[in-house]
Amino acid sequence: MAITDLRQFIQLLEKENDLLRISDEVDLKFDISGYIRNTSDVEGPALLFENVKGYSMPVVGGLFSSRRLMLKAMETTEEDAVIHYQNAMKNLSEPQLVNSGPCKEVIKLGAQASLSDFPIPIHSELDSGPFITAGVAISKDIEDGGKNASIYRFEQQAERQLGVLSPIPHHLGLHYQKAEALGKPLEVAIAIGVSPAVLICTQWEAAYGVNELTLAGALQGQPLEVVKCETVDLEVPASAEIIIEGLMYPEKRQMEGPFGEFTGYYTSAYPKPFLEISAITHRKDAIFQTALTGLPTTDNHVLKMIPMEASCYAFLKQRFPGVNKVHFHGAGGVGLLAVVSIKQHTKYEARNMLATMISAQGTKLVIAVDEDVDVFDMDKVMWAVCTRSQADKDLIVLPRTAAFQLDPSVPEVGVTTTMGIDATKPYGEEFEEVTTIPGAEKLPDILKLWKK
Ligand SMILES: Cc1cc2nc3c(=O)[nH]c(=O)nc-3n(C[C@H](O)[C@H](O)[C@H](O)COP(=O)(O)O)c2cc1C
Ligand SMILES: [Mn+2]
């Protein structure tokens, strides 16, 4: 069954005992993010907060707090996830325009619209205020109409004002830059509480001008239904819980931040553009969705993993057919740490692959392992590093390359050093035998026995 809205995903999680309802009263300030922090750290259930202090609207969060939940959202398995995502990228489908949808049950225009109606959480200690963290911003190029849909953080600055972080070359930032250069306001709509496919499609690193929403239909196995907005010329997912519409005017800035980011550190405050809200529409019994960002691993990291792995796998496979699996580990936040398993066909093939990754991909640490090592199991990856590599011959260091902006360890802005560790067995040489226990995999599942 295709999941086409947030509620169906919540139902699925509840049915599979992966949703916990929190009926104790929670405060918007730190309680919701605290609970999500804790469930993220134990790869626990997604959370539905039914009793948010001062609000009748529930909040759902942590829906992507672990890879297990992400796989459920994609209705796939670990084995098939990357292929599933790649197949979807090959079968894009235009969103289907429909006349109306649940997101139009309540329509509030102009001064009727207010962010105070919505339980927007405050996440980390030094955050400047409440942030919408699971909103998909939809906008288009003011000249050629090319569309974009992606997740950006939005700071609640006033009743009808949201600060926007979309630094160039991110596409909302480019849309705004173009509109501003022409002295015109940019129309933006933000969809909150959408089908998992809509959130996941936004993490596809699609080229400028490509509408990420064309991937959502392919991911969810049926066309994405969209409706026209009330006050801006944009189309938004019909089944969304909440839609915020507004304009980003040229030459206007306000201080935004700090905010606890996915690096595990705060990004500091500086003046940024903002959205002036022209309308809010929502379901009658809307559910507000939030996502945690912060010290790995959080929703923010998990949402990016499979899309990044799918792109990187396709890139590496062209040049290195022996590449088996690619995993971007959350600790690298997500782009800075990758593990690649490879079946080598020539001596030093893994080294060539590492050199490619640490230069072309800008990943700070890439570890190559043999096919018998599970790239998702860091214990086994580190075992391979400790028992199959020697630093004097298996470490590749590439000094002075372009840096990921938010890495606080860089010696100067924009500059970093990347490295690769070849933890594969030497090609074509005898190596020690790995210990195994014959038939262990055929014995009854311990966890199932234990739970009985
Ligand atoms: C939960 C979450 C929050 C994010 N917040 C931001 C943000 O505030 N600003 C930003 O530029 N990118 C943010 N991103 C990353 C972008 O969504 C991602 O890089 C996307 O591919 C950019 O799309 P674009 O190339 O269309 O701009 C976030 C991602 C996730 C999963
Ligand atoms: Mn884009």
Image (spheres, rainbow, N blue to C red):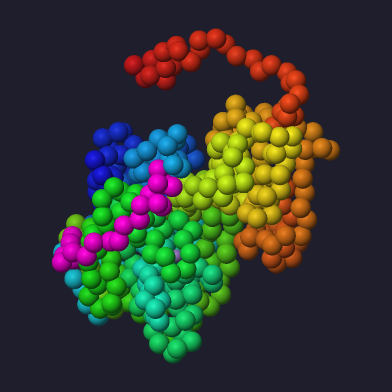
Residue 55 magenta-highlighted: no
Q: Position of residue 204 (x, y in %)?
A: 45, 56
Does residue 81 appear left or right of residue 99 in this picture?
right
Task: Say if residue 171 shows up in the picture.
Answer: yes
* Residue at screen point 71% across, 44% down: 352
Q: Find the residue positioned furthest to the top.
A: 438
The quarter of the picture where residue 289 lies is bottom left
Q: Is residue 136 above or below residue 279?
A: above
* Residue at screen point 58% across, 68% down: 268
Residue extent of the magenta highlight: 84-104
* Residue at screen point 52% across, 63% down: 259
* Residue at screen point 56% across, 36% down: 324
Q: Quadrant of ligand 2?
A: bottom left
Q: Position of residue 190 (x, y in %)?
A: 34, 67
Q: Find the residue positioned furthest to the bottom.
A: 183
Does residue 258 appear left or right of residue 355 in this picture?
left
Residue 98 magenta-highlighted: yes
Q: Quadrant of the C terminus?
A: top left
Q: Quadrant of the N terminus?
A: top left
Q: Is residue 298 above or below residue 285?
A: above
Task: Say if residue 302 shows up in the picture.
Answer: no
Does residue 85 appear left or right of residue 312 in this picture?
left
Q: Position of residue 413 (x, y in %)?
A: 70, 67
Q: Position of residue 2 (x, y in %)?
A: 26, 44
Q: Is residue 392 above or below residue 166?
A: above
| Of the pair 332 and 317, the residue shown nearer to us | 317
